[in-house]
């Protein structure tokens, strides 16, 4: 089986087709031979019945062989029984006592009418199937030699005319026998039907089976090769597509079958790869651009200090360097996290989002940062790590704190299997045209959101990435108060993470 899996698919298909065809043709050959045997068997029985009629007619003949015409053509094995079960005449060699015990004479029938028709002759005949005793030798009509028969044989039993004592004396050589019917048993010679069935089966097995299997294997080879041509075209096109050359697409066959769906899926994958590559290149370019400013500031301050070390305020230089290093650390940390937003916890790791919100609100109040008013806080468990959910909440609050004038509100509601986290501020707000752009990387909408007073431009991008990684969304909506900004994060709650409300 392991070797079979190593073979090309066309060879495997051809072999499977050949084996299946050989199995079908083999069974068909046996069935056709059996049907041919059954079709010819009535002819053999009819021949046995004619022989029984000849035997019955030859009872009173003084010369048995001449009356039967045996010298012209041998007869199949026969036995003539009297009413008492004794053998009147037979050509069977072997243990006759055991054989006649299996072929008893039936009760006598009314004698034949002078104008008896074929139906009356048929009515006086029956088939008797027995298992021949050992050491009983029978003869077929086409062979003058006696041989042990197959164990299961069939005789035609015929009840003929009623013969007088003279006819019976001529038959048996025993005088004084009462008038009685003689029961004639003739072996049904099925050698001819068997030979014909064997000949037909042999032809099918020797010629039809191998050539038919070979023909079907060839057809399977050609059909599979034709069916795989689109796959080969897809393979060649994929081989031509390089790592950075993702604008080309594989050909899609017109038939909407599995191969057509494979080609369509391949093109969709290439589209996603092209988008991912373009996004990666844009991220690298944006990150390089963002990193250049703090690095330039840091190096500039150090270069100036080193150029005039005697006049440099080294504590101030050190503070500037630390500030730049902290900004670089935050920026690189955000970039690293941006590539891990698809981190998901297992089904047995459920993080209470409401607890994280409570902790962050309390921590901000302790540190003297602007207070956050919690309007609603439902209990929500989400299948995500605490660090990711903490960053999601923290970035939303940092964004609101950065631009709020005096008020920040937060609400966590769980309805209909979805957790909705809303963070709003009373700051300058976000124009309707920019509500989608704020979630892009390194986007700052105005001069007030610059590199010095604003963030790295990755905070809301991280929020959306974390939300989408959990199967949710992050959007900027029109504020309910009519002014300021309002951000909405919707995340589906799994059944294990049920939600219930309590007063904040």
Image (tube, rainbow, N blue to C red):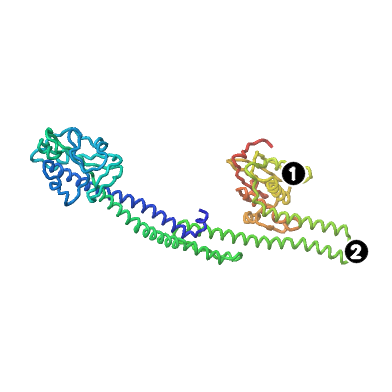
Across and down, in percent, residue 435 comes to 63, 54
Q: Is residue 442 left or right of residue 211?
A: right
Q: Secondary structure at mark 1?
A: loop
Q: Secondary structure at mark 2?
A: loop
Q: Earlier in the sequence, mark 2 or mark 1?
A: 2
Q: Which residue occupies 42% across, 61% down?
A: 223
| In the depicted structure, whether residue 108 falls above or below residue 313 | above
Q: Is residue 477 visible?
A: no
Of residue 148 and residue 351, the one placed in the foreground of this image is 148
Q: Answer whether labels 2 and 1 touch (C-beta < 8 Å).
A: no
Across and down, in percent, residue 87 comes to 20, 37
Mark 2–mark 1 distance (CA, rounded to whole Å): 43 Å
Q: Quadrant of residue 127?
A: top left
Q: Is residue 217 visible?
A: yes
Across and down, in percent, residue 401 comes to 73, 49
- Which label sits on residue 371? 1
Q: Callout 2 environment at 10 Å: few (<14), some (14 to 19), or many (20+)?
A: few
Q: Which residue is mark 2?
A: 311
Query: For the residues carrying marks 2 and 1, which lies nearer the camera in this image?
Result: 2
Q: Is residue 231 left or right of residue 115?
A: right
């Amino acid at each position: 089986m392991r070797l079979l899996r190593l073979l090309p698919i066309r060879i495997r298909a051809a072999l499977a087709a050949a084996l299946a065809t050989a199995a079908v043709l083999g069974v068909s050959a046996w069935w056709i031979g059996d049907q041919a045997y059954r079709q010819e068997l009535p002819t053999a029985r009819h021949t046995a019945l004619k022989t029984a009629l000849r035997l019955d007619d030859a009872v009173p003949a003084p010369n048995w062989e001449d009356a039967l015409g045996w010298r012209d053509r041998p007869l199949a094995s026969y036995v003539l029984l009297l009413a008492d079960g004794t053998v009147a005449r037979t050509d069977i060699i072997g243990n006759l006592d055991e054989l006649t015990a299996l072929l008893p004479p039936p009760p006598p029938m009314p004698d034949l009418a002078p104008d008896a028709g074929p139906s009356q002759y048929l009515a006086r005949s029956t088939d008797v199937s027995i298992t021949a005793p050992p050491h009983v030798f029978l003869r077929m009509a086409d062979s003058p030699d006696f041989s042990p028969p197959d164990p299961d044989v069939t005789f035609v039993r015929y009840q003929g005319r009623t013969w007088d004592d003279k006819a019976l004396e001529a038959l048996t050589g025993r005088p004084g026998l009462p008038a009685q019917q003689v029961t004639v048993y003739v072996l049904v010679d099925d050698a001819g039907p068997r030979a014909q069935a064997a000949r037909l089966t042999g032809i099918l097995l020797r010629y039809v089976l191998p050539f038919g299997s070979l023909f079907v294997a060839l057809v399977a080879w050609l059909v599979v090769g034709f069916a795989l041509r689109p796959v080969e075209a897809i393979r060649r096109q994929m081989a031509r597509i390089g790592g950075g050359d993702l604008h080309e697409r594989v050909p899609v066959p017109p038939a909407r079958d599995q191969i057509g769906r494979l080609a369509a899926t391949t093109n969709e994958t290439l589209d996603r790869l092209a988008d991912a590559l373009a996004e990666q290149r844009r991220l690298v370019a944006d990150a390089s651009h963002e990193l250049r400013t703090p690095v330039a500031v840091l190096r500039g301050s150090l270069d100036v200090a080193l150029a005039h070390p005697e006049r440099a305020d080294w504590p101030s230089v050190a503070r500037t360097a630390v500030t730049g290093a902290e900004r670089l650390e935050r920026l690189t940390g955000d970039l690293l996290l941006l590539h891990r937003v698809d981190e998901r916890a297992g089904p047995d790791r459920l993080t209470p989002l409401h607890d994280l919100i409570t902790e962050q609100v309390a921590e901000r109040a302790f540190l003297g940062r602007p207070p956050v008013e919690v309007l609603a806080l439902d209990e929500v468990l989400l299948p995500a790590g605490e660090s990711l959910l903490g960053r999601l909440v923290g970035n939303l609050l940092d964004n609101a704190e950065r631009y709020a004038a005096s008020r920040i509100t937060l609400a966590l509601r769980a309805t209909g299997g979805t957790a909705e986290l809303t963070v709003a501020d009373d700051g300058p707000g976000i124009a309707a045209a920019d509500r989608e752009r704020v979630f892009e990387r390194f986007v700052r909408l105005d001069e007030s959101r610059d590199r010095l007073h604003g963030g790295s431009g990755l905070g809301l991008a991280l929020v959306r990435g974390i939300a989408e990684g959990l199967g949710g969304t992050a959007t900027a909506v029109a504020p309910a108060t009519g002014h300021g900004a309002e951000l909405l994060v919707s995340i589906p709650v799994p059944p294990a993470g049920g939600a219930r409300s309590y007063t904040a």
